[in-house]
């Protein structure tokens, strides 16, 4: 779904991180990256389906308010990164991302998304923002240990890594 680019996006709770560093860490459930080629915003959400529906239901001239989260519980037991992007350059032919969960003991979960697509057909309008074509997320239950987890997202092209996001959250029963 196309959205017109706005200068201030998703500022509901806290501030966004804006940097061109290779690894972007954020403790508020959202982070942003911009280079001359691409702009990417990642927001942790508990309900990916309703977030996508909200994104797709507003007119192109508007952006929905999307609330980030840093908490998962047994009642609200799902977490996913909602990723939107804007292409600034014609040089990029495809962007992918890997999405993985780092568990409280530092090990990477066996459940992850690899080489997920940003788009199926390259966006043509540089003035619009788009949500990614493929999503990932994790559900928690009473067998999962309480504590801090990290969602790590690596964004790359066929030629180079663009950036990496690390977004921690807490699971409590």
Image (cartoon, helix red, strand yellow):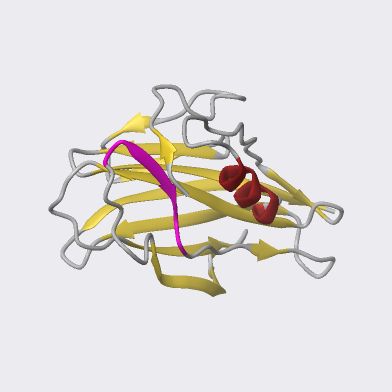
Residue 93 highlighted magenta (yes or no): no
Q: Is residue 163 left or right of residue 75?
A: left
Q: Vertical placement of 64 versus 76: above or below?
A: above
Q: Is residue 135 left or right of residue 171?
A: left
Residue 123 x/y as whole percent: 30, 53
Quarter of the figure with residue 6: top left
Which span is picked out in magenta?
126-133
Q: Residue furthest left?
A: 91
Residue 36 x/y as whole percent: 18, 38
Residue 135 x/y as whole percent: 53, 62
So how many labels did they put on this image? Answer: 0
Q: Vertical placement of 6 versus 136: above or below?
A: above
What residue is shown at x 59% (from left), y 34% (from top)? 64
Q: Residue furthest front?
A: 59
What residue is shown at x 17% (from left), y 45% (from top)? 89
What residue is shown at x 61% (from left), y 43% (from top)? 57
Taking depth in this image into account, of 167 and 114 the one nearest to the observer is: 114
Q: Is residue 10 left or right of residue 140?
A: left
Q: Vertical placement of 120 versus 50: above or below?
A: below
Quarter of the figure with residue 69: top right
Residue 130 highlighted magenta (yes or no): yes
Taking depth in this image into account, of 172 and 13 the one nearest to the observer is: 13
Residue 1 x/y as whole percent: 48, 49
Q: Quadrant of the C terminus?
A: bottom right
């Amino acid at each position: 779904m196309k959205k017109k680019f706005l200068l201030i996006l998703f500022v509901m709770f806290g501030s966004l991180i804006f940097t061109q560093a290779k690894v972007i860490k954020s403790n508020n459930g959202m982070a942003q990256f911009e280079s001359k080629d691409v702009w990417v915003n990642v927001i942790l959400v508990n309900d990916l389906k309703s977030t996508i529906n909200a994104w797709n239901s507003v007119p192109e001239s508007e952006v929905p308010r999307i609330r980030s989260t840093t908490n998962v519980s047994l009642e609200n037991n799902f977490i996913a990164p909602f990723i939107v992007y804007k292409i600034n350059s014609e040089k990029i032919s495809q962007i992918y991302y890997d999405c993985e969960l780092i568990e409280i003991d530092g090990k990477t979960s066996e459940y992850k998304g690899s080489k997920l697509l940003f788009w199926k057909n390259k966006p043509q309008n540089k003035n619009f923002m788009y949500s990614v074509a493929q999503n990932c997320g994790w559900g928690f239950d009473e067998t999962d240990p309480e504590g801090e987890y990290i969602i790590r997202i690596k964004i790359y092209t066929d030629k180079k890594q663009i950036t990496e996001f690390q977004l921690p959250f807490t699971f409590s029963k």
